[in-house]
Amino acid sequence: MPLLRNHMPLEIEIKGSDVQRDEERKGEEKERREWTEESAGRYLEECKDWASGGRTVEEMWAEIKKKINEAIPKKRVRIRKWSIGEKVWHDKELKERKREIRRKMTKFRKGKCSREEFIEEKKALKQWCKRRKEKQEEEEMEKINKLKTEQEAWKYINKYRRRREVVGEEIREEEWKNHFIETLEGTENKEDRRTEGRREEEESKEEREDNIEKEEIVLQIRKLKEKKATREDGLENEVWKYAPKEVGEALWVMLGKIWNGKRIPEDWRKGVICLIYKRRNKGAVKSYRGVTLMDTAYKIYAGILGERLKVEIEDKLINN
């Protein structure tokens, strides 16, 4: 569903199929990257001496994404729904301890440590897990014993059930479209963006003096939060936070081209709207608000523009 804002065309997709129903599910499979010290190091190694050979912004963006996905591919993992009584103590500390056990096992196989040392490490981990489990059970029982009313009991239960509201199935797609056209102040007209983009590139051959600085990109990357949902491009914020200098250089060159008038990548013109139920009638579109997920690289560029605009406005206010 294309929408045209006054600053740039934006194509959005209503994400209704991904909204979870009230039915209980054992788990679901997802593709994601695991960010550890080892994977971050491998990311740096795989991108060593790499450089983008793309000439246009679209080509450069395609190459950057391809290189990232090759350097640190996603793995298919099963995401299980947490329920009361499960092991909440399975945290980073446990993962690190298990990693140490695997390192010790590798040393044992190579003859760099004795069998007794390896067995002692395993026993220590088992005892640690037992203590953590007992502590977690005690904490849960303490919370349960403090419950006094039925309302408090259900509040405790629902806290861990993580139920999501069901989107009104009787709402037609046309209603969603009209609702977000009105909310986002867009139109239904779709321009021939390729023709328009080529014309813009031909007209803007002169390079601007106030080019984007690398420091501006670094500042925006620092603002990105880890462990957030991926956007249309499938790239997590960690991709940029742990980016090798080669990837950062390619991003800087590409953003410089865009700043100098080149057309932004087609991916950046699309956003996915996730529906969030607010209140009242579930069968009415006005009972929902939308959160638009945009590509991470677009967020970096938009952040730079926002900071520059802020400085310009402040300067004008001071002069006036």
Image: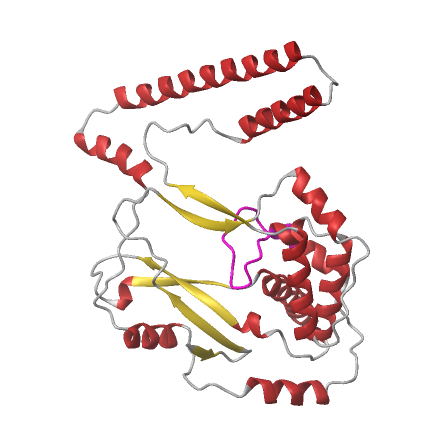
Q: Position of residue 257 (x, y in %)?
A: 73, 74
Residue 318 seen by the camera? no
> Residue 314 lies in what quarter of the image?
bottom right
- Front-most of residues 80 and 12: 80
- Front-most of residues 111 and 264: 111
Q: Tell me if residue 101 comes above or below residue 297 in the rendering.
A: above
> Residue 1 lies in what quarter of the image?
bottom left
- Front-most of residues 41 and 259: 41
Chosen colour scheme: secondary structure
Residue at the image position 42 percent from the left and 70 percent from the top: 13
Q: Is residue 209 magenta?
A: no
Residue at the image position 32 percent from the left and 19 percent from the top: 142
Q: Position of residue 274 (x, y in %)?
A: 39, 61
Q: Magenta part mainly helix, strand or loop? A: loop
* Number of marks in the rendered image: 0
Q: Tell me if residue 314 comes above or below residue 185 in the rendering.
A: above
Q: Is residue 201 left or right of residue 78?
A: right
Residue 262 seen by the camera? yes
Q: In which quadrant of the rendered image does the C terminus lie? A: bottom right
Q: Is residue 227 magenta?
A: yes
> Residue 136 lies in what quarter of the image?
top left
Residue at the far left in the pictured view: 150
Q: Tell me if residue 77 comes above or below residue 235 in the rendering.
A: above
Q: Position of residue 151 (x, y in %)?
A: 19, 34
Q: Is residue 35 left or right of residue 78?
A: right
Residue at the image position 41 percent from the left and 83 percent from the top: 188
Q: Point out the stretch of residues depicted in magenta.
A: 220-237
Q: Position of residue 267 (x, y in %)?
A: 56, 70
